[in-house]
Amino acid sequence: MNKNVRKANVWLWLTFPIGSLLTIAAGGGVFINGLYRDTPYFVAQAVGQDLISLIVVLPTLTVTAFLAGRGSPRARIVWLGGLVYLVYTYVVAAFDVSFNSLFLVYVALLGCSLYALIGGLVTADMVEIKACFTEKTPVKAISIYLTLLAVLFYFMWLSEIVPALIAGEIPQSIRDNGTPTNAVHVLDMAWVLPSFGITAVSLWRKQALGYTLAGAILTYGVLLTLALLSMVAFMTRDGHSIVVPQVVIFGALFAISLGMLIWYLKGLKSSPAPK
């Protein structure tokens, strides 16, 4: 194992504290009645997401960390995507969830996930990862898809925010959640959606950065849309109204993102092609 690989694999060890903290945070949300002190609407969403974090994200992160340590570039990309999901999720938990007994767990989980993501990206050999992709990799299709996603979600969020600003009112989603702002709006418009655009451009130009980030972002998209569908199921169970067109969109995005991720990773080999 060369020195660069050892440096990259050091960050995989953070998966152990992340997994332990995630078990407590998500398990607490699912199994501890009364943990959340938020509005019933917000609680239904939080528990729905906790279930996916516990039964899908946790095993995905654990297995891919193990396989990445054994040299799998596919596993490393999926592991990075799982970390993007956790950073996104626990920024929301740390800032939007009403203070509860697991607050410090949310903070620690956010910190470990964030530094694992930064370290994993900084030490990833992106040139080598790019070299592992075949010419059949759907570079342009993925680039177009990520661009369309960025445009779609900017439109969705701004169509809620701008009319509220003009009318001097609070957006409906913020009233429903009972939070000062909607952290999803902030994270999407300030971080996630710009990263979609950067990745789309980099991938279209066949730059090494785009090849690594595209797989991670698609993984994040699969996990997040699955969590959103779980939120909808819990909201329906608890008698809350849902926006049917948005549910249809999220369901379609889950299916398309999963298909795109599988298609993308099929073009990734375990080692670069010989020259």
Image (spheres, helix red, strand yellow):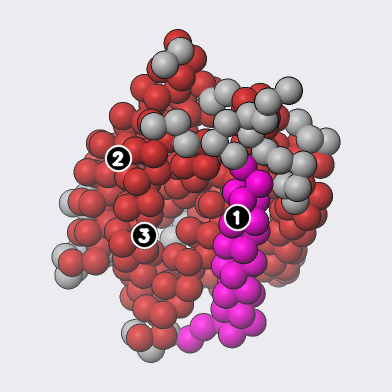
- Pointer 1 with pointer 2, Cβ within 8 A: no
Q: Secondary structure at mark 1?
A: helix
Task: Please rate how many residues cluster around mark 3, counting C-alpha atoms within 10 Å: few if below 14, some from 14 to 19, many from 20.
Answer: some
Closer to us: mark 3 or mark 2?
A: 3
The image shows residue 75 at horizontal and vertical percentages of 47, 42
193 sits to left or right of 36: right
14 sits to left or right of 1: left
Which residue is under mark 2?
A: 18
Prevailing secondary structure class for the magenta stretch in the rendered image: helix
Say which of 181 and 220 sits in front.
220
Residue at 34% over, 38% down: 66
The image shows residue 216 at horizontal and vertical percentages of 56, 44
Image height of 273 relative to 187, above or below: above
**Whether residue 165 is visible:** no
Which residue is under mark 3?
A: 56
Q: Looking at the image, which residue sits at the far top?
A: 3
Image height of 201 relative to 129, above or below: below
Q: Secondary structure at mark 2?
A: helix
Q: Looking at the image, which residue sits at the far front?
A: 274
Q: In the rendered structure, does residue 141 fall within the stretch colored magenta?
A: no
In the picture, the disc for residue 228 is none
Task: Please rate how many residues cluster around mark 1, counting C-alpha atoms within 10 Å: few if below 14, some from 14 to 19, many from 20.
Answer: many
Residue at 77% over, 42% down: 135
- Pointer 3 with pointer 2, Cβ within 8 A: no
Of the image marks 1 and 2, the number of the one nearer the N terminus: 2
The image shows residue 101 at horizontal and vertical percentages of 18, 51
Residue at 32% over, 52% down: 58
The stretch of residues the image draws in magenta is: 241-268
Image height of 39 relative to 215, above or below: below
Which residue is under mark 1?
A: 261
